[in-house]
Amino acid sequence: MDPSHKDPNQLGLSRHHIMDSIDKSLKRLQTNYVDLYQIHRWDDATPIEETMRALNDLVRAGKVRYIGASNVTGWQLQKIVELGRTMGLNKWITLQAQYSLLCRYTEWELVEICRREGLGLLPWSPLKGGWLTGKFTCDMTAAPADTRVGWASEKEGRKSQAAPDFQQYAHSEKFWALDKVLKRVAKSKGKSVAQVSLRWLLQKDTVSSVIIGVKTLQQLEDNMGAAAGWELTQQQMDDLDAASAVEIPYPYEQVWRANKAQGRRRP
């Protein structure tokens, strides 16, 4: 869904674009089907029913095994789930969303929908552009140029919520408190800070896998070291939850406070 494309038929989630895109993708990949096909974001210019029917037809045609969504809001995801039921379509099974120790907002609605509706959550930016790797220290005055944070800091307009620049956390007492907890846990487990950050996600009950991005073989091997063979203790999970907690807005705070009084859990 490239907004810079000049051909209006090569934009958005219309049936025409979906059908054309899958055929081009299969040709490039030199395969007959893909395991998982996800929409990248909601398209206000196309009725979601049209999108869902087109994707369902791809499953029936054998070109796609499973369907998922990415970067949608809570109401959008729930609407997709409910329409799938009423229209008798194949169930969407995944949600790809930004989620990390520095992005807990995903828990307000999306995590709970995944839990209740049986969707697997696939967190992207699990290390928040490198901030959750332990490579930064509070005495630094700038990010190294060869890091993603350095890239985001280099030019105006590069930084974003998903790719924070150096100033985003360099002077944040809350971030450095979290960094301290991460490094303490990593030392006690004999693991890297990045591995602990990824492991925290992998132990969340709605998370099926995490989406990583690496530049070197060493980074890949380190990230993969979070996958199996060890676990964080419940106390360590609780400590990381507490250190990364964000202020909860209305109405979520009121709902969760009531649930806590009744002995129910938060995400």
Image: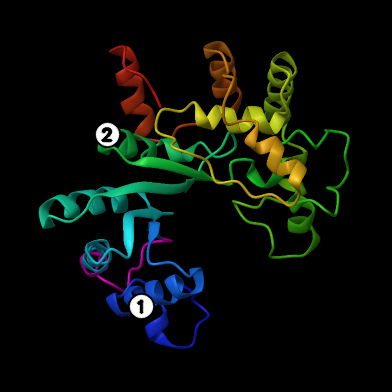
Is residue 47 in the magenta section?
A: yes
- Mark before the other along the chain sequence, 1 or 2: 1
Residue beneath the point at 76% across and 33% down: 134
Stretch of the chain drawn in magenta: 39-51
Residue under label 2: 116
Residue beneath the point at 63% across and 36% down: 224
Is 249 on the left or on the right of 133, as rendered? left
Residue beneath the point at 35% across and 53% down: 68
- The residue under label 1 is which amino acid type? His
Q: Is residue 6 above or below residue 248?
A: below
Q: Which is nearer the eye, 41 or 91?
A: 91
Residue 80 location, x and y as percent? 25, 54
One can see residue 67 in this view: yes
Q: Main secondary structure of the magenta part?
A: loop
Residue 128 location, x and y as percent? 64, 44
Is 209 on the left or on the right of 195, as rendered? left
Q: Residues within 10 Å of mark 2 (few under 14, many from 20)?
A: few
Q: CA distance from mark 1 to mark 2?
A: 31 Å
Q: Residues within 10 Å of mark 1 (few under 14, many from 20)?
A: some
Q: Is residue 136 above or below residue 262?
A: below
Rendered-image quadrant of the C terminus: top left
Name the secondary structure under disc 2: helix
- On residue 17, the disc is 1
